[in-house]
Image (cartoon, rainbow, N blue to C red):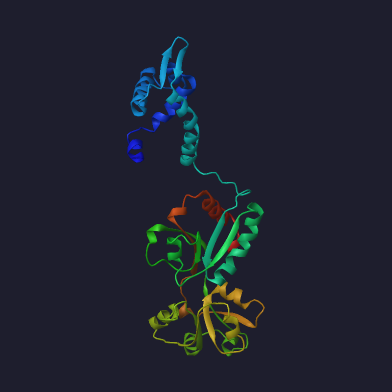
Amino acid sequence: MLHLQLRQLDLNLLVILDVLLDVRHVSQTAEQLNMSQPGVSRALAKLREAFDDPILVRTSQGMLLTARAEQLRLALKPILTDLDRMVQTPEFDPATDRSLIRITGLDLEVGLYFPQLLKQLRLQAPHMRFETVRQELDSFPMLERDEVHFSLSGLHPMHAEHALHRKLLDETPVVCLMWNKNPLAQRPLRAEDYARAPHGMVSLTGRGPGSMDHVLERVGLKRSVALRLAGFSSVADFVEGTDLIFTLPKKVAEYIARGRELVLCELPDALQQPPVRFYLYWHERYHRDPRIVWLREQMGRSAWMHA
């Protein structure tokens, strides 16, 4: 019943009613609202019909509010204030904001890109809180389910792409990572040497060929994968002191090789492929959220992704 009554009332009339209840005069209400006097009179007639009450009554002392109008006057202002707040663009001040922002991505991707950004954000938004959420096999459904605000990923969504937005963070070539005493590290790498070497690969699913298997197939070669890992965190331990080689984005390989006896080698010319691109993804529901807009702007202004 409440919804039915609201549907019968033009909410624009409440703005006119608010002024009428204050000034108690049709012509003065018209002047304040930059309306015609007949327009305010028609609005008053509709209000009287909607509330089944005269609202204003003429007396020897001028126009007075009815008892019902007095009740409306007390209730109306906070309602209009709430409605006004609802339709206004939400205010955002990074210096005082205490939002919790959730980010997902592979551990190495988060470790590679997020710390530098966080250092910058802590200076401008000292009360904003952040949480990294363990990534599932595919982080994009996590965005759809509103479990995270951002996803750091070098992958592309398989579905619901229309509901996702993205920003390019970085692009990096693909290289080989190997022990610095591996014989292949002592000379330029040939495609045949690459194919014959025992390979390690990081596979989130643990199934199917990697991208380099398709590259090799195009030139009539095939490799042997001796080790599959579910993540990047232990790659250095498996490469150092062995003949295994991993094919990785250069930024990732550099991060893994820090402080280890590992080297990066360029892929043979015949096996070169386009650079790997890392993106920041977010869902349409947050596309105009002032917090998310501000965070995206900080990422665009910062040199953190090129560190």
* Side of 267 relative to 207 (left or right): right
Vertical relation: 296 (above or below) 140: above
Vertical relation: 201 (above or below) 173: below
Q: Residue at x 50, y 89 (%)?
A: 198
Q: Is residue 170 visible?
A: no
Quadrant assignment, res 156: bottom left
Q: Nearer the viewer, residue 264 or 187?
A: 264
Q: Nearer the viewer, residue 45 or 152?
A: 45
Q: Residue at x 37, y 62 (%)?
A: 160
Q: Is residue 45 visible?
A: yes
Vertical relation: 223 (above or below) 111: below
Q: Nearer the viewer, residue 78 or 276?
A: 78
Quadrant assignment, res 306: bottom right
- Quadrant position of the C terminus in the picture: bottom right
* Side of 206 relative to 301 (left or right): left
Q: Residue furthest front?
A: 67
Instruction: Give residue 134's position: percent from left, percent from top.
Output: 52, 69
Q: Residue at x 43, y 55 (%)?
A: 284
- Quadrant position of the N terminus in the picture: top left
Quadrant assignment, res 184: bottom right
Instruction: Give residue 274's position: percent from left, percent from top.
Output: 46, 71
Instruction: Give residue 130's position: percent from left, percent from top.
Output: 59, 60
Q: Nearer the viewer, residue 185 or 116?
A: 116
Instruction: Give residue 88's position: percent from left, percent from top.
Output: 48, 40
Picture mark count: 0
Q: Residue furthest top?
A: 60
Vertical relation: 304 (above or below) 66: below
